[in-house]
Amino acid sequence: MIEIRQATINDLLQLANLFNLYRIFYRKESDIEGAKKFLSERIQYEESMIYVAEENKKLIGFTQLYPQFSSTRIKRYWLLNDLYVSEEYRGRGISKLLIERAKQLSRDTKGAGLALETEKTNIVGNRLYPSVGFSISDKTNFYWWDNS
């Protein structure tokens, strides 16, 4: 049975491994120590909400959300920044369970909703998100300034 629950500092080692695989998926170099430090800080300082999918005491997926604020809506909303399921567990609806938990977080915090972005080349994600109620916004343009 798959359990979706909030991550704790006790999950750090398994979670860091999943997070590292997620970063590799997005063409970043492997950095387990960096992943541990980053996630430890998010959990310790309560800067994000991380939910994990667990089966038989093994973490098999996660999602990480960051609180954002909308001045025009005068509400908080949540940025669904990360979503990852281990390859061998894909196709079982785990991503949908994690997204449903993220939606519940938005409802519980009286948020305006969830926002996310994914690469145009992410075929699986671009099929998944509309299937769970997300729609592509044609009202705004997304811009990025790179400080590197």
Image (spheres, grey):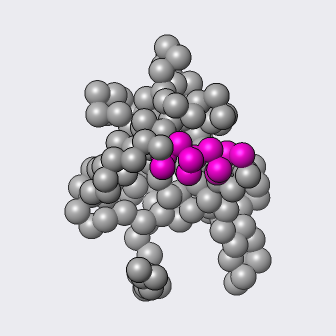
Residue drawn at x 48%, y 49% is 34
Q: Position of residue 84 (x, y in %)?
A: 41, 43
Q: Main secondary structure of the magenta part?
A: helix
Residue drawn at x 27%, y 67% is 120
Residue 84 seen in render: no
Q: Position of residue 96 (x, y in %)?
A: 45, 41
Residue 148 seen in render: yes
The quadrant holding residue 127 is: bottom left
Residue 41 versus residue 141 in the image, above or below:
above
Q: Is residue 35 magenta?
A: yes
On the rendered structure, is 140 left or right of 24?
right
Quarter of the image that includes the C terminus = bottom left
User: 5 or 103: which is nearer to us?
Assistant: 5
On the rendered structure, is 86 left or right of 111?
left
Q: Residue furthest front?
A: 33
| Residue range corresponding to the magenta coloring | 34-44
Residue drawn at x 64%, y 51% is 42
On the rendered structure, is 70 left or right of 58?
right
Residue 1 versus residue 62 in the image, above or below:
above
Residue drawn at x 47%, y 43% is 33
Q: Position of residue 62 (x, y in %)?
A: 49, 40
User: 66 or 3: which is nearer to us?
Assistant: 66
Q: Position of residue 13 (x, y in %)?
A: 52, 31
